């Protein structure tokens, strides 16, 4: 399976990094927003460089297509999907990082613009990142995930686990109902304050870690 291949590849990278750094443990381990009808910037980011990475895994030690994340403590494959090149993958890990969402390493999203099943309006935060999305007729949660280069649908589910849905999402399924006009949160720091479903706002209990909320 795809996940098994990525996990195997990452394990090999972790072994390389551990040998290079002398580690033997084996553990390597958006705020006010401005509506915009146009997609947010699609400029391709530059992979993390050795100078940017903290002590630990160094970018120069990694095979092509891998990125350093979590301050040099982990490495992930690049994100999949046409138009999403140059972004670190939203690779699932542990649930311990205070900046992670349920074990996903957060990294930036990219708005590909209107696509099939995702033609609604985007709200962009002050940092230029997609912050929220208003669903249009014919949209699906999976279409929205593709539009914003979210390669693990469960990440979008967890971004919206409190105010819509059922408070949970697994790796590959996204069981949330979607209605035209629904607001979908895209910012890891507004999980508790942005989002609604058919005009209703829920307050679901969640069993995964989220960052401090705004």
Image (cartoon, rainbow, N blue to C red):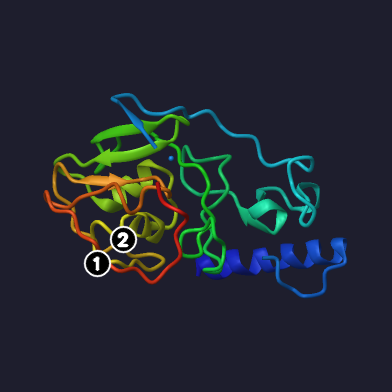
Which residue is disc 1 drawn over? 166
Q: Residue at x 54, y 55 (%)?
A: 99
* x then y, percent, for residue 202: 20, 59
183 to 38, vertically: above or below: below
Give yes or no for contact between labels 2 and 1 (Cβ–Cβ under 8 Å): yes
The residue depicted at 18 percent of the width and 54 percent of the height is: 201
Inspect this view and state whether residue 113 appears: no
Q: Upstream in the sequence, badge 2 or badge 1?
A: 2
- Left or right: where does residue 57 sit relative to residue 130? right
Task: Characterize the local packing of mark 1: few (<14), some (14-19) or many (20 or more) Cα atoms within 10 angstroms.
Answer: some
Task: Determine which of the numbered discs, if any, sits on residue 125 in the image.
Answer: none
Q: Is residue 157 left or right of residue 81?
A: left
Q: Residue at x 37, y 60 (%)?
A: 158
Residue 51 at what x, y percent from top left? 79, 40
Comparing 105 with 115, the one in front is: 105
Residue 10 in which image quadrant: bottom right
């Amino acid at each position: 399976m795809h996940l098994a291949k990525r996990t195997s590849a990452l394990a090999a990278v972790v072994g390389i990094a551990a040998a290079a750094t002398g580690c033997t443990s084996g553990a390597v381990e958006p705020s006010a927003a401005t509506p915009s009808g146009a997609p947010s910037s699609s400029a391709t980011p530059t992979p993390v460089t050795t100078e940017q990475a903290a002590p630990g895994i160094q970018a120069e030690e990694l095979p092509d297509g891998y990125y350093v994340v979590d301050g040099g403590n982990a490495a992930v494959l690049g994100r999949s999907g046409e138009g999403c090149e140059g972004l670190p993958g939203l690779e699932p890990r542990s649930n311990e990082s205070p900046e992670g969402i349920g074990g996903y390493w957060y990294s930036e999203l990219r708005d590909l613009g209107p696509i099939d099943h995702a033609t609604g309006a985007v709200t962009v935060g002050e940092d230029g990142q997609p912050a929220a999305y208003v669903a249009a007729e014919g949209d699906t949660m999976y279409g929205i995930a593709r539009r914003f280069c979210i390669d693990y649908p469960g990440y979008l589910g967890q971004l919206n686990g409190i105010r819509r849905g059922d408070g949970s999402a697994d790796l590959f399924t996204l069981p949330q109902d979607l209605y035209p006009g629904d607001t979908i949160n895209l910012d890891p720091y507004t999980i508790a304050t942005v989002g609604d479903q058919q005009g209703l706002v829920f307050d679901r209990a969640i069993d995964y870690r989220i960052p401090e909320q705004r």
